[in-house]
Amino acid sequence: MGISSFEGKVAFVTGGASGIGLGIAKVLVERGAKVVIADLRPDHIADALASFAGGAQSNAVSALVLDVSNRAAYRDAAQRMQDEFGGIDILVNNAGVGLEGPILDATYADYDFGMAVNFGGVINGFVEFMPQMRAHGRGGHIVSTASLAAEVVMPAHMAIYAASKAAVCHYCEAVRGELAEHNIGVSILLPGPVASRIHECKDNRPEQFREGSGYDASEERLSRRIVGDDWMQPEEVGKLVCDGILANETYLVTHGVFKDAQRARAKAVLDATPDRIEPLPDFGRYRD
Ligand code: NAI
Ligand code: GGE
């Protein structure tokens, strides 16, 4: 199913110029893939390309500027991948923002920002690249970065983020069977705390989501947060992701630290579920 080796394969990594996406890009390149980094931030792209410069496989990496929430721009980028590489083999839907703030401060601009980037960006990736992967007939693999935030009841101030990541998770689970029929594997990355620049949220807000935001103060505070030296390094995540692609694993989980909270949420839903063993109603019947 999907991908059986990275040698000569073409990968498109969104948010690939920093943090987890860059860690994934590095390991993909090490294992023989050609990687195109797609990222909103030209400064992150410059840093990322500099980190590959001089390395043995530096010519296997290139980059383009893309806001994954911009559908017209995403379509152009996918077309470029078709024209220049004959289509991609691996899509990593990783671009995302860690927006947070009190729920009563949130305005529609904040909801739209969180959903359009974290969930919309993933949807746009699937919509633009699924036809390409089917048409070239080589099969492929799509990894999307959700979060362990999708598996637990989140702490205060993270409702929009949690909703966007739960949407990513459930969408990927639901399309997995259909895409398997087209030899396209699907994996969901569920990370815990990883060293990155996720605190730079305020610099990653596209213009159309700025006016009327209630999260200016929250984002200013977040931008000053210190990255812990005990947070996982992105390249460790990259190895987990690359191994998971070859095995076509559904869930790629980096940390066990939230396991009790994951269990508590699952248990609460099961505890609220009645034990009745009535037959499943038939909801597959239609009028002529
Ligand atoms: P990061 O900020 O270091 O990297 C994200 C990259 O995505 C940045 O280079 C940024 O410029 C880019 N980006 C932001 N908005 C974009 C857009 N609209 N279009 C294209 N690129 C865009 O952060 P990190 O932590 O590496 O985040 C990657 C993904 O991992 C996100 O989806 C995040 O929600 C998720 N995640 C991160 C965790 C962590 O602890 N760092 C834990 C769980 C999930
Ligand atoms: C490391 O920084 C972040 C962040 O600013 C926002 C979100 C996340 C990391 C992650 O998606 C996860 C951490 O694994 O989200 C959580 C944040 C706080 C408590 C629990 C979380 O996930 C279970």
Image: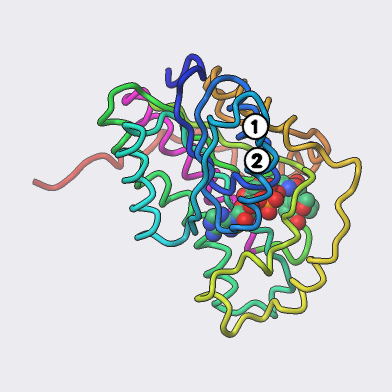
Disc 2: which residue: 22
Say if the magenta span includes residue 180: yes
Q: Are marks 1 and 2 in contact (CB under 8 Å)?
A: yes
The residue carrying pointer 2 sits among few (fewer than 14), some (14 to 19) or many (20 or more) residues within 10 Å by Cα, namely: many
On the rendered structure, is 31 left or right of 88?
right
**Disc 1 CB within 8 Å of nearest ligand 1 atom:** no
CB at disc 2 and ligand 1 closer than 8 Å:
yes
Inter-mark Cα distance, 1 to 2: 6 Å
Tell me if I can see residue 23 in this picture: yes
Residue assigned mark 1: 26
Q: Position of residue 266 (x, y in %)?
A: 68, 41
Q: Residue furthest front?
A: 54
What is the three-letter code of the residue carrying label 1? Lys
* Residue 27: image location, x then y, percent: 64, 27
Where residue 209 sits in the image (x, y, percent)?
Answer: 54, 75
**Residue 271 lies in the magenta-colored region:** no
Which residue: 75% across, 48% down?
196
Query: Dot 1, how many residues are within 10 Å of its Cα: few (below 14), some (14-19), or many (20+)?
Result: many
Tell me if 158 is positioned left or right of 144 in this view.
Answer: right
Is 91 located above or below residue 33 in the figure?
Answer: below
| Front in this rendered view, residue 172 or 216 | 216
Secondary structure mostly taken by the magenta-highlighted segment of the chain: helix
- Between 55 and 178, the one nearer to me in the picture: 55
| Badge 2 element | helix
Q: Amino acid at mark 2?
A: Leu
In this rendering, is residue 100 above or below 207?
above
Residue 173 rendering spot, x and y as whole percentages: 49, 37
Magenta stretch, residue numbers: 160-183
Of 10 and 209, which appears nearest the observer? Answer: 10
- Residue that sits furthest to the right in the current view: 229
Tell me what residue is drawn at x 60 percent, y 23 percent: 244
